[in-house]
Image: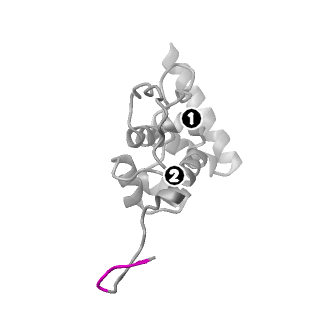
Amino acid sequence: MCQHKNGTLLKWVYNNDIMGRRSKLKLPPLKKLKETFGQRLANLRKAKGYTQTELSKKIGLTQGLISDYELDKLRPYHEMIIRFAIALDVSSDELLGLKEYKTNGNGRKPASKLLRRMKKIEQLPDFKQKVLLNTIDTFLKGAEK
């Protein structure tokens, strides 16, 4: 803390000695990423079948904060990147756009509607799951003809 000349206390938000100084190294520029962090977060969230509210409950944030991250109004610090990566079951490299995230094998991401339904099916008792899966299998066999 520091005292201002009129006697009020001011907090140091940024202390150059603690936070580090700007590097004098001549680093090459990073490659241009396809998406911003917020866009990437939103796409991964949707690909995993979560709503903003569901993801916020999983992480312990409010839905409004998830929205702010997705709209690039907030920049995540390292702990939030880890929390998002764990909640979305992706690596931090995938979350940051350094690696492509995995799809379901056909090059397309699973539809979020299907993922939400699969989560509901997993919560059913075993015998109801078997009945439902048999019904789906029968339908798919008929659709292939």
Give the percent coordinates (x, y) of residue 142.
Answer: 52, 20
Q: Is residue 4 magenta?
A: yes
Relative vertical location of residue 129 with respect to residue 63 in this rendering, above or below: above
Give the percent coordinates (x, y) of residue 71.
Answer: 33, 47
Disc 1 crowd, CA 10 A, few/some/many (<14, 14-19, 20+): few
Query: Mark 1 to mark 2: distance in Å?
Result: 24 Å
Disc 2 target residue: 20
> Viewed as shown, does residue 119 lie left or right of 50?
right
Give, as a three-letter code, the residue at label 2: Gly
Q: Is residue 75 magenta?
A: no
Disc 1 is placed on an element classified as helix
The magenta span reads: 2-6
Disc 2 is placed on an element classified as loop
Give the percent coordinates (x, y) of residue 73.
Answer: 33, 52
Disc 1 target residue: 93
Q: Which mark is residue 44?
A: none
